[in-house]
Amino acid sequence: MSRFRDELWQVVAGVYDEIQAHPFLTGLTDGSLPREAFRHYVVQEALFLPDYARALAACAARAPSAAAVQRFAGDAARTVEVEHSLVVELLAAFGLDEAQARRQGAGPTTVGYTSYLVRTCSLGTFAEALGAIVPCYWIYAKVGEKLLKESSPDPLYAWWIETYGGEEYQETVAGVLDLLDEVPMEPVVLERALTTARYEWMFWDAAWRQERWPCG
């Protein structure tokens, strides 16, 4: 592990620990998570992923090397093709389609998270963009790896866990982490990473609370 990779993880590790202890994730593994909370998560994920793919594409546009361009352009395409397809199937399990999900609308946390990602990846340096995007990869990989060992008695939750704990996703994340060796160790990169790590916690917490806009 490179020094910067290690330093970045130390910055987000406390947030990751809180994510692992969150009742949304513990409820996934023991099967106690209310289906309505998972439904909320799936709907918000359907609204999150298109902007996440846009953020990845912006990373590709700012990338300094051909390998990094290929990495993020490919991941943007896979987000639309693979993760989006999974969400469509999960929506169907709740009797929903994408149009119905869009009508429900993005919640406050989803709007804040996607806005921050797209803005940082579009307007910041490549190092800032990488700092912002890495926690999305890394935390999901670590969460998936841990949950895969525990799985879930609920087949729907077990299905979701297998996607992010599987070997293919872990290899994808390893490739992104290698890019950290190519960027300068700047405090702003760590700040971007901490912000998006916090948004990761907020996204699961919003699903747990079934977050709604406070007015209107």
Image (cartoon, rainbow, N blue to C red):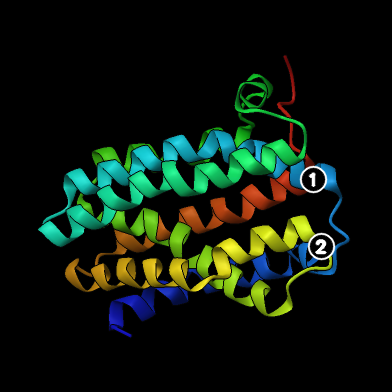
At which x and y percent is residue 206?
A: 70, 44
Q: Under tag 2, what secondary structure? A: helix
Q: Residue furthest top?
A: 216
Mark 1 vs 2: CB contact within 8 A: yes
Location of residue 33 with respect to 184 vertically, above or below = above
Q: Earlier in the sequence, mark 1 or mark 2?
A: 2
Residue at image position (77%, 37%) is 94
Task: Name the side, left or right, on which 159 lies relative to 144.
Answer: right
At which x and y percent is residue 169?
A: 46, 66
Location of residue 201 with respect to 110 vertically, above or below = below
Q: Under tag 1, what secondary structure? A: helix
At which x and y percent is residue 213?
A: 71, 26
Q: In the rendered structure, which amino acid carries the disc numbered 2?
A: Gly
- Looking at the picture, tell me which residue is in the foreground, 91 or 13: 91
Which residue was labeled with disc 1? 37
Task: Name the side, left or right, on which 112 lies relative to 9.
Answer: right
Residue at image position (53%, 43%) is 85
- Determine crowd level at label 1: few under 14, some 14-19, many 20+ residues with C-alpha closer than 10 A: some
If the image is split into quadrants, where does the C terminus sit? top right
Which residue was labeled with disc 2? 27
Q: Can residue 16 be spotted in the picture?
A: yes
Label 1 to label 2, Cα distance in Å?
10 Å
Residue at image position (84%, 56%) is 33
- Looking at the picture, tell me which residue is in the foreground, 166 or 187: 166
Q: Can residue 24 be spotted in the picture?
A: no
Residue at image position (61%, 29%) is 106
If the image is split into quadrants, where does the N terminus sit? bottom left
Task: Name the side, left or right, on which 203 lies relative to 29.
Answer: left
- Determine crowd level at label 2: few under 14, some 14-19, many 20+ residues with C-alpha closer than 10 A: some
Q: In the rendered structure, which amino acid carries the disc numbered 1?
A: Ala
Location of residue 136 with respect to 84 vertically, above or below = below
Image mark for residue 85: none
